[in-house]
Image (cartoon, coloured by chain):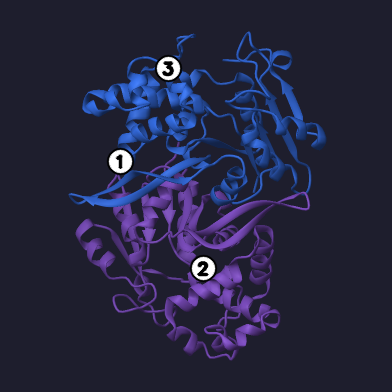
Chain colours: A blue, B purple
Amino acid sequence: DNDGCLWAEQPVYFQLLFAADEVRRLAPQHPEWQQTEPFRSLLAGDMKAVASQGEKAAAQLVAASHANMTTDEFDRRVRAWLESARHPTTGRPYTQMIYQPMRELLDYLRAHGYRTFIVSGGGVDFMRVFAAEAYGIPTDQVVGSSGKVSFEMRDGVPTLVKLPEINFIDDKEGKPVGIHQYIGRRPVMAFGNSDGDLQMLQYTTAGTGPRFGMIVHHTDARREWAYDRDSHVGRLDKALDEAARRGWTVVNMSRDWERVFP
Amino acid sequence: DNDGCLWAEQPVYFQLLFAADEVRRLAPQHPEWQQTEPFRSLLAGDMKAVASQGEKAAAQLVAASHANMTTDEFDRRVRAWLESARHPTTGRPYTQMIYQPMRELLDYLRAHGYRTFIVSGGGVDFMRVFAAEAYGIPTDQVVGSSGKVSFEMRDGVPTLVKLPEINFIDDKEGKPVGIHQYIGRRPVMAFGNSDGDLQMLQYTTAGTGPRFGMIVHHTDARREWAYDRDSHVGRLDKALDEAARRGWTVVNMSRDWERVFP
């Protein structure tokens, strides 16, 4: 049995864009949103006002676009969005806005008999559609945050319904817990890019035998973004300190990556 | 991507024997158990009295033997038990007390490009060790019931601790929910043997395209057991009725299986 290997890039940002587009699409059926934040600002096109409302606003947009529908319906919506939506600056589909070196790494590991998993802070039902299309990773090898789901018979049809209740948050301490609950064994390698990956890296590299921990440091303002200790989104601070102490490899994107996107 | 295929035999009974053996092993450290049911009856060898206390007693034995330890420690205990414990009537290891025809079915499906999963009402941390040894199924393809787990630093060592709180019950309505949350797509085939598998069979066979549902009917008192509608353990009643209505295949163990155990 080959040990699992993790890859933790988080297209959480894409999921928020999906949520925003869904709220715009569904707005005609929700006149009350014109009076309620963060929907009002979003529908008025004031993304700065949405962003200023922080994580609570993000959670509200996700709840409004990710719950109270069947799992099949949600799956269809994500697929439709991934097909039609385009990245605002590059004009390319989001499934192509992934890191070329990480895709090569996944291919390389699989060619050497490793099983590869995604362990994301993003919603697992979104990530599974994305990961299958972008990375060729099957649904059961994607671990993520999730809402509760209920089983119902609707007119004799067995139906799974997404509920507006949190089931599991796959971030920070949640990542090693998610690895245990969903994968069931400790990986031999882990790759992260933020403090949300710290505990996963600690847990992975503390196992017996050879272990490998790696952090992608976003240092490339020209081709991508440059941020670390002071960023509100994807902060990389504690994990960067710990990388030095524990001997994890830190990839300097601007220096080490010949190509960023495919 | 090959669709998953499920197999739902439940060695839950083996897990209870493990729990009972663990309580006996741990009894010297728990003098209070001599005064408390169901421990007192168990330690006195009165299994009839334990059984008469029903599911609550089973849950207490499981809690006493499955929580308040690290996941690594639990894993070691299950391995040690599977190595040393022997089935009371056959004298064979429990990992050999599995159904030969179902093992052949798993091999057959894998040889034809299916991925095979176990979806069990039993505890997933127990089932994963068992399924790897008995069926060659990797840990991440086992879905089961689970307790909550916490991540802690213990003297600088990243540690996962099993808590005495229920996280998920993978039975009845829980089975299709577990399939969605842990596997992330609807299987094309499902195999069950009790009413606990009914909703999984309904969900699986309601998908589009060719689907297959199968129920193993325990009819063989000579080589195994004979039970169905009136049994307290592993009752098969509603699912048997629904099999006729929905065209699921019912395997009559005494008539259809040339061999039961390997």
Q: Are marks 1 and 3 in contact (CB under 8 Å)?
A: no
Q: Chain of mark 1?
A: A
Q: Is residue B243 above or below residue A132?
A: below
Above or below: residue A214 compared with residue A150: above
Residue B180 horizontal side relative to residue A160, left or right: right
In what quadrant of the picture does the C terminus of chain A appear? top right
Amino acid type, label 2: Ile
Q: What element does badge 2 sit on? A: loop
Q: Which residue is mark 2?
A: B98
In three-dimensional space, the C-alpha distance between marks 3 and 2, rounded to whole angstroms, equals: 59 Å
In-front residue for pair B67/A44: A44
Mark 3, residue position: A47
Give the x, y percent position of residue B189. 37, 51
Seen at 61% across and 10% down, the residue is A223
Do callouts 3 and 2 mark residues in contact (Cβ within 8 Å)?
no
As rendered, which of A7 and A137 lies closer to the eye?
A: A7
Q: Secondary structure at mark 3?
A: helix
For disc 1, the neighbor class at 10 Å (few under 14, some 14 to 19, many from 20) is some
Which residue position is annotated with label 1? A70
